[in-house]
Image (cartoon, coloured by chain):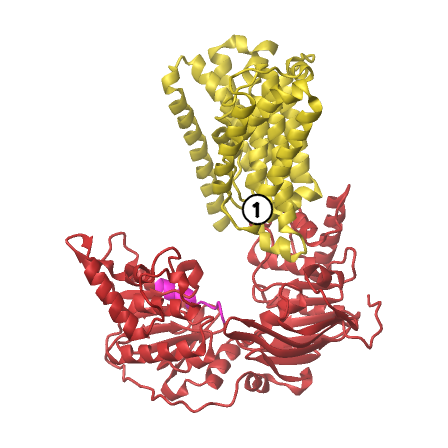
Chain colours: A red, B yellow
Amino acid sequence: MTAIPLRHAVIEVADAKVSFGAVKALDGVTLRILPGECVGLVGHNGAGKSTIVNVINGGLSPHQGTIACAGEPMHRYGIAAARANGVRCVFQELSLCPNLTVIENTRVMHRTLTGWGWRRRATCIIGGKLDEIFPGHGIDPTGVVSDLSIAQRQMVEIATAFSQVAQPVKLVILDEPTSSLDATLATQLLDYVRSFVEAGGSVIFISHILSEILSTSDRIVVMKDGKVVSERPADEFDEHSLVAAMGSVVKRRDQEKRITDTAGLTPLLAQPSRRGKGLPFAAFPGEIIGLAGLGGHGQTDTLIDLYLARTGSWLRRRDAEVAFVAGDRALNGVFPLWSILKNLTIADLAGLCRRGLVSENAEADLGQAWKQRIEIRTQDVGNPILSLSGGNQQKVLFARALATPAPAVLMDDPMRGVDIGTKQEVYAILRAEADKGRTFVWYSTEMDEVCLCDRVYVFNNGVIVAELKGDAVTEKNVLAASFMGAAA
Amino acid sequence: MKKVLSSDTIRLLIPALSLTVLLISVFYLQPRAMSYVGLNLLFNLAVPIALATIAQMLIMTVNDLDLSMGTFVSFVACVAATFLEATPVIGVLVLAAAIATYAALGVLIHVRNLPSIVVTLGMSFVWGGLAVLILPAPGGEAPGWVRAVMISRPPFVPMAIIACVIIAVVSHFVIMRSSFGVILRGVGGNARSVERAGWSILGARATTYALAAFFAILAGISLVGLTTSADANIALRYTLLSIAGVILGGGEFTGGRVSPVGAVIGALTLTLAGSFLSFLRISPDWQIGAQGAILIVVLGLRLLLNRLENRGKRS
């Protein structure tokens, strides 16, 4: 399987730097993958794991740094070059074409499957690989992918990545491959990974289940804030030292946390425990509540449920109880063709209405007031919203929610891609509004933001697994709760 | 492991059933249609519509929509009745240029991330204008060989039926069976993963558009073969007919879910619906409305089946 001499790395990324706007996703990462080893890659959200994966599979060119395959520096490294060098990737989000059959998806992934009889060959390849990795899988290769369950799709994707058609498979990147597999299937996969590695292949293994990482990897690379912070053989780590390596020295907090005595108070928002498991959710007036845990473990669903439970009526209530700040600005935040002012006032048009018509004067006054209060950097709020930088657009979205009389504001990771200066301004506004009695429910993937909250619910697999209060809200505790919950 | 009916079969079932029901009703109303000549007359005009439907289906495979189909087919008909007849070399060159233009449109739509509806709506005026320039008044003459093919009388089965079967088989092979068609449908299903596998989405789009233009050109030429002369407005109805045909045949607007066989059946159903209403002696004023009603009934049936299927999957 390995035609290259053992001394060369399958792939070597040196000093890779990638930044998206103000955010440094990768800040000088060096990673060498040798033939015949399984490298575990761990880190919290936004540590840069997915970014380095995208650099290695050719989907993203680093703004700085070099990539070498089998000892030869690659100048034009792209998806095609990566595949030609035997790099395959199983992505975190499922990436099969749902309208095609399993064999047709195999064809999409393997360029050389063409000509007469390609269906027969593809059936042999994918069927054989599925049997090899997941004996007794029960997947019909001629079936359409949209008819398969999530676990079956994941199995197909893994088998496709490992199957060899023309170029030998040298490196397979598995990004959270076990997240939708049950324990039996996960064991089958991990066993296969070990045998693949022993046969001379290489694997980069990303998982939030630390026990899997520890048992499967030869070497573990820990990333944080776009840097590699620790790199050691797997047997030198245990679960606690891994969690410790992912965190950082606890910083002094300059803000006093408020610990409200909630006993006996009626919560402003409440929700029973999700799917009958975990802890119930409750929010009291004047609190800033953080929703933490690894991305996509039910935080956004909780926010949407909270929102819909109070606004999901066909008739608009005059006084809204909750306002929502969307995380994905482009997708469900801004109205791109509208002015800053119109974007700001849309949530509270009812409050600006006089006899059924929107009062332009009241709208302009509101716009001026908020422009000064949150310092939107523009000459005129009549300018189009897209003339603002991303951070300032986000401030407008905050103002949109804060301008409503709603006593509770739900925020779905709104600070993605916002520079640090703007963040500080928004944090101050949040704190000031909370002191006036508003409640904030804040899902954030950034540890610093979670640590600003008065109380934090940690999510895992769709349920709340821990509640941290006041001084207990520390990076260490949040990390421990989100990873230990997964291991349990 | 195999289920009794796969979702693809169910998808084809409704159009096939509705065509059968319509056909039986037509035979009941007008038993003389149940003959060689009768069938040929019933389905004659379905051939160009089926070709245009396949062209539209290709565009819909990559999640786009072509609103210039009608004017483009008209333009091709005008070219076929003039240049292709008088100076075949120039005629072929013009048609090749039209295919290149379609490929360029695919590139433009992809590179600039434009809505295909807007681009093709704009192009519909260009094609319409060119058609008027070529044939300011109805006229021209169909090339002899096209005419000969379209009025030929093969034994036992009328030309129209044979042509429709050939169209269905060829396009089924290209879109559903060939390894190339898989990529086209993959682009409609999940363009990002196709791109991650190292394919050029740009190339796939351009090819799809060029292939669609090719089928639309066949539609225009066969139409002229039937009508013997052309007019700049000859096929304006084809834009909506082709879209309706794809949807009737089990295709969807997004997601790369298409069915060439279904599309041909859809085109046949639409053609037959017109004859059916004439046999019912419904006044022409009401025919378009009645045709719409038939469409709504068939699509309603499909929605119902989809819902049943989803419920079955969930439980």
Letter of the chain that mark 1 sits on in the rendering: B
Give the number of marks.
1
Q: Position of residue A410 (x, y in %)?
A: 34, 68
The residue tagged 1 is B108
Closer to the camera, B119 or B9?
Answer: B119
A357 or B129: which is nearer to us?
Answer: B129
- Picture coordinates of residue A87, whole percent (x, y): 72, 64
Q: Is residue A128 above or below residue A297?
A: above
**What residue is at 54 percent from the left and 51 percent from the top?**
B112
Quarter in which the N terminus of chain A is drawn: bottom right
Residue extent of the magenta highlight: A295-306
Q: Amino acid at mark 1?
A: Leu
| Relative to A224, residue B287 above or below | above
Q: Quadrant of residue A466?
A: bottom left
Q: Nearer the viewer, residue A6 or A455?
A: A6
* SS type, badge 1: helix
Q: Residues within 10 Å of mark 1 (few under 14, many from 20)?
A: some
A126 above or below A487? Answer: above
Measured from the top left, where is residue A287 in percent x and y? 30, 78
Decide whether the magenta segment is chiefly helix, strand or loop.
Answer: helix
Q: Where is B113 relative to A238, above or below?
A: above
